[in-house]
Amino acid sequence: MKKVLWVLLFLSCLSTILLSQEISEKEGKKVIEDIRRDLNESLEEKVFRSKNTIETRTASGEAAFETGKERMAFLKMEEKEIMEFEEILGMEANENRVFLSQKFDEIHKEFNFNKNEIESISIENKKLNEYLSKLNNIEQKIRTGN
């Protein structure tokens, strides 16, 4: 009888260990999948994957630009190498050329400017809505008073 209990206890412990290992493997696979999606997903997909409120869209836009900055770091190094090779070879740099990292920086500045503008408009909108609700309350008090 004791042997049967020990065998059952051993089997239950073994099944618990295997189950917990399977769960941790699933969580690990999910984390790896999230990382892959983050790396392969375009910036536009990151922005529009979010909910449709102003705050979440700007937050996801910021996250997308952070990912873009990480990707641009590699490009900037290659662009510097190109300029160094041109200098070594004695080639004249094209004045009209704009590197992708420069364009990204310009767009990021524009995004930050627009984001700040949206935030100020949103704050002003909240204040106006509060003022409007106060006016509605006053109007209701006047109507009930008459």
Image: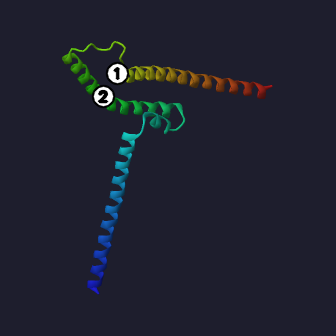
The amino acid type found where label 1 is placed reads: Phe
Q: Is 130 or 109 nearer to us in this picture? A: 109
User: Dividing the picture into quarters, in which one does residue 77 lie?
Assistant: top left
Q: Is residue 115 left or right of residue 31?
A: right
Look at the numbered discs 2 and 1 and tell me whether their residues touch, using CB distance below 8 Å.
yes
User: Dividing the picture into quarters, in which one does residue 76 lie?
Assistant: top left
Q: Looking at the rendering, in which quadrant would you find the N terminus?
A: bottom left
Residue at position x 34%, y 12% in the image: 95
Q: Earlier in the sequence, mark 2 or mark 1?
A: 2
Res. 130 mark: none
Res. 99 mark: 1
Residue at position x 32%, y 32% in the image: 70
Tell me if residue 85 comes above or below residue 16 in the rendering. above
Q: Is 28 or 146 nearer to us in this picture? A: 28
Q: Which residue is mark 2?
A: 75
* Element class at badge 1: loop
Q: Is 70 or 14 nearer to us in this picture? A: 70
In the rendered image, residue 71, in percent from the top left (x then y), is placed at 33, 32
Crowding around mark 1 (Cα neighbors within 10 Å: few <14, some 14 to 19, many 20+) is: few
Crowding around mark 2 (Cα neighbors within 10 Å: few <14, some 14 to 19, many 20+) is: some
Q: Looking at the rendering, in which quadrant would you find the C terminus?
A: top right
* Element class at badge 2: helix
Q: Is residue 137 left or right of residue 26?
A: right
